[in-house]
Image (cartoon, rainbow, N blue to C red):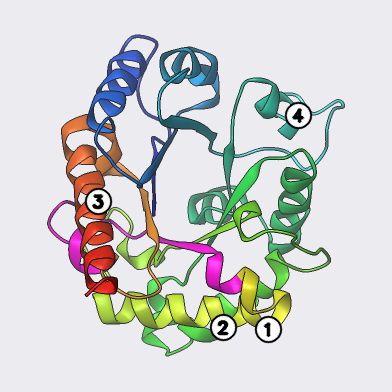
Amino acid sequence: MLIAGNWKMNTDASSCVELARGVVQESENAGVVRVTVCPPNVFLSTVGTVLNGTRVSLGAQNMHALGSGAYTGEVSGEMLHSLGCRFVILGHSERRQHFGETDAEVNRKVKKAIKVKLVPIVCVGENLDQRRAGREREVVASQVKYALEGFTLSSSNALIIAYEPVWAIGTGETASPVQAQDMHALIRKLVRQQFGEKIASGLHILYGGSMTPTNAKDLLSEKDVDGGLIGGASLNADVFGQIIQAAKDVEQGSRTASTT
């Protein structure tokens, strides 16, 4: 499993260090659970220094589709890679909603990330109106199709998909485990159709809709939920640590069940 923290536009020069140190401490006994944090770009180098030599990896929240050029304020994948980033979040609902990011733009970024050896965490998900209209599967299928169009994968570790029901982000609402599993299974089916069984079965599909210590174990216990993309709960190291522990408990339970 992978537990990823998206700090969004939070922390400052001192609190990012404190938070990163706390996450490192909380991750010391995470077992096979992988952990990454994605701080604001201005703190990537600072947080990267704290994470260096630990089991917590560094990720970024966004990147440009081109490697360089006259794009004031943008950050390229090459820059992120040079700072030691392993992951980059792409197509987050907030990027789509507030900055008009399109499926085509997400696709270009995904291709570039893979090319520069970053692992894209590709976000897909429906908003409240779309779910109320019964269009959630149609919307997610379209986003997955366009995000993954025009390239091949040699390994299931080269890409991650995060399902984020937009109606559950920052609202206190959460998709039920059954709802989450239904959408994750759909995503895996779509990946299987495009890349084959080997890639689909090994691909990590994260849940990204307000996962907390209270609901983490139930969500992570679902067959096709392979971790979480955590927003607000990742800003408190102790709370984030409880989610990591929930993932560890689920992993250990699965391993015990498979040997009995």
Q: Which element type, helix, strand or loop, lies under badge 4?
A: helix
Q: CA distance from mark 4 to mark 1?
A: 31 Å
Disc 3 and disc 1 in contact, CB within 8 angstroms: no
Q: Is disc 2 surrounded by few (<14), some (14 to 19) or many (20+) residues within 10 Å?
A: some
Q: What amino acid is found at the position of numbered circle 1 in the picture?
A: Gln
Q: Which element type, helix, strand or loop, lies under badge 3?
A: helix
Q: Which element type, helix, strand or loop, lies under badge 2?
A: helix
Give the labeled residue for mark 3: 248
Give the labeled residue for mark 4: 78
Q: CA distance from mark 1 to mark 2?
A: 6 Å
The answer, for residue 73, to whether it is visible in the render is: no
Give the labeled residue for mark 2: 189
Q: Which residues are magenta?
A: 200-219
Mark identifier at residue 106: none
Q: Is disc 4 surrounded by few (<14), some (14 to 19) or many (20+) residues within 10 Å?
A: many
Q: What amino acid is found at the position of numbered circle 2 in the picture?
A: Lys
Sequence order check: which comes first, mark 4 or mark 3? 4
Extreme-left residue of the structure: 214
Q: Nearer the viewer, residue 147 or 37?
A: 37
Q: Nearer the viewer, residue 55 or 258?
A: 258
- Residue 119 as seen in the image, left or right of residue 32: right
Mark 3 or 2, closer to the camera: 3
- Residue 2 vs 253, above or below: the answer is above
Sequence order check: which comes first, mark 3 or mark 2? 2
Sequence order check: which comes first, mark 2 or mark 4? 4
Q: CA distance from mark 4 to mark 3?
A: 33 Å
Mark 4 or 1, closer to the camera: 1
Give the labeled residue for mark 1: 193
Q: What amino acid is found at the position of numbered circle 4 in the picture?
A: Glu
